[in-house]
Structure formats: C-alpha cells, structure tokens
Image (cartoon, grey):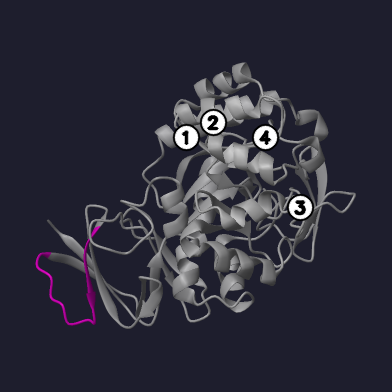
Amino acid sequence: MSKLVIRAGGLVTGGRVQGRSTVAVADGRIVAVDAGHDTEPGDVESVLDAGDLILAPGMIDLHTHGANGARAGGTTRDLARMSEFYAAHGVTGFLASVGGDHESIEAGLQAVAAYAADQADGSGAVCLGAHLEGPFINPGGAGAFPLDTVVAPDPILLDGYLQRAQGWLKVITIAPELPGALPLVERACAAGVTCAAGHSLADAAQMERGIEAGIRHVTHLYNAMRPLHHRDPGIVGVTLTDQRVTAEVIVDGLHVDAYAVRLLLAAKGVERAAVISDSIAATGLGDGSYEFLGQRVTVADGAARLPDGTLAGSVITMDQALRTLVGTVGVPLGVAARSVSETPARILGRAATSGRIAAGMTADLVALDADMRVAWTMVGGRLPTE
C-alpha cells in the first residue's frame, strides 16, 4: 500500500495545536499521525512538505444556501460550482440548504439527490445531503423566507419531500409550536432525518415538547426565534440548558454578538455547538444587488439584506467564520477548529470517519497559514492539484 506523507509545521488535534507533525495518507484515509518529522513510514510514494502550515481537519458546513453565484436549490451544475468554491475555503463536506416554494423545494431536493449519489471524483467538497429549511416554519419567525412559502405541517408534503430526496435529506428545520408539528417531527425522525427547531416563536414548554418528540438540533441559534428573556427563556434558554440538543450559530460578527457566542460555548461546550456559514449565492461576488428566493438582496459592508433591512443569510465563508471565532470571539484555534469539523461531523452521525485527524479517519484536511488563511484543501486524500 503506497503512502503520501505530509510534513507540516503544526497539527490541530484534541482541541489544541501541537508542533511539527507527520501525517501519512493511503487510499483516501489517514493511516498514521506522528509528532515531529523523524518518522520514516514504509512504502512512501511521495512526500508533501507543508512547511510552516498548520494541518486542521477539513471543515463541514451544515447550513449553506450557496456561493459563487450558485444556489443550493439549483441544478447539479450549481452544486458542482459550490463544491469547488467551498474546497478553496477549507470545506471538505457540506449540507445543501434547500427552501422556498413547493416547486423549488422539490427541484432542489431532486438535484441534491442526483449530485450526492454520483459526485465526480474531483477535488471539491463533498455534498453530504440536504437540509430542508422550511416550509414548516412560523410566519412570525420566517426571517428572510417569503411568507407565501410558509405552510402548515403536512405529512403528505413531508413524505413527498422524503421521496424526492431519496435518502439524502439529512436535516429538517421545523417550528415545534405549530399545530401538527410534533407528529411531523416523529415522522421525520422515523425516516432517519435529524429534526431541528428553528424559524420559531416557541416558548420553553413548546420547545421541551419538541425535544420529547425527537428534536435534537437548533437552526442558527438566536436568529429567527423568540429572544432569550429571564422570564421567557424560549428556544434559546432551553437549548442552552438541555444537553440533548446541539446548536449551530452564524459567526460573522453581524448575526450574533461575540458575547452570545461565548455564552453558547460556555453553556454547551464546543462538542455541542457547530459554526455555520448560512451563506447565500452572493457569497464571494462582492457588493451589489442579488437574488434570494425570488427577492432582491443588497450586499454591502459584509451583510446581505432585504429591502426592509432584514438579514438574508450571510456572505461569509467557513474560513472567515473560523477567523472570526478566533480573532473576535477569542476562542483558541484548537477549540475553534472542532466547531467547524468534529462537531458538525458528530451531528451528522459521521464522527467515526470525519472531523478529526487520526488514523482510520477519512483524509479530509485543510492547511492553514499563520493568519488562518487556506493554503490548500485535501478531500478524501486527493491533493489540491489532482
């Protein structure tokens, strides 16, 4: 068995950054990890000298609507374009977030199923499935979703979406307080889909009932939901104190204040808090006027907003989110890296193969410079030039 040996200036492992390290890769998997550069593994086919770069686990984005002009609910070509863009920013796996009206959802799920089942063997990030955000959400917490796309929980609709997704629907966001929501949660859980609470005005008791029905995740905590109040804790209060649920958070310096991110991490620990991008198709294109779910969106000063000022997703990349988490929130790199790799892998049930740099894991790696900029990304053992 031939091996590729990577020698790097540092390695993110176990929540910390250790010094010079050697990682051996064969057949798409990590076969050895050693401190220093003195190891001489047998049957070496090539050596990649990463110099002073730091190796970290490839990032996994649980929540993205698109980037580089491509929509997650678009075509397989859109998904391929997104895949290449994400890999350039350290992402090795992602869930395509699909939403909008009924026709858009059906088309989006069908495209994700087709692409995920037959992805080209290239260097782009792997599409791990779909996240269905809506349509079973509260109109009062719709956020940037058009109100005419919001519908009441409907088991027939859900069954149709499950059929379209062909097993690739991995997460669904539901407002647990809606009439009929809890049976829908139970139905989705029975189909192997992770149920998330979000775009919701649920109070604490309603959220607790949702958890009892099977909710195990929370979509972009703090945003598009009842705010935390000491006499009305709502979804936020329950999420921070109930260890049965995980949470995701947008760390772009706009959606959530740094203190609120620190509160999430202090309450739940990094093992139950994942950082997401919630990026839209305008990501990577600069300031200007764009479209999101049939609505005009203006991007300026790092924010995407509807005409009324509502934030419409984000225009950050995952490596930007990582830098913000370290530089603004103040989380050490070793810990921050877990929130963009190991934790999302665990949420998706992929912790046995993804999210860490260890023998036996898939060789999904990102090489970062001293400023946490991406030098290159390896997906499944494939070099960036392959």
Whether tag 2 and tag 1 are in contact, CB under 8 A, the answer is yes
Find residue 153 and report its horizontal and vertical position in percent: 67, 25
The picture quadrant where one finds residue 31 is bottom left
Labelled pair 2, 3 in contact (Cβ < 8 Å)? no
**Number of dots carrying numbers:** 4
Residue type at the position of mark 1 = Tyr
Which residue bears the numbered disc 1?
115
Q: What amino acid type should be assigned to the residue bearing mark 4?
A: Gly
Q: Which residue position is annotated with label 2?
A: 111
Q: Is residue 22 above or below residue 248?
A: below
Q: Amino acid under label 2?
A: Ala
Relative depth, front residue between 46 and 83: 83
Distance between mark 2 and mark 3 Cα atoms? 41 Å
Residue 9 placement, left or right of 187: left
Q: Position of residue 163 (x, y in %)?
A: 51, 20
Circle 3/circle 4 CB separation < 8 Å = no
* Residue 86 visible in this rendered orientation of the protein: yes
Residue that numbered label 3 is attached to: 232
Q: Nearer the viewer, mark 4 or mark 2?
A: 4
Amino acid tagged 3: Asp
Q: Nearer the viewer, mark 1 or mark 3?
A: 3
> Magenta segment, which residues?
30-43
**Marker disc for residue 134:** 4
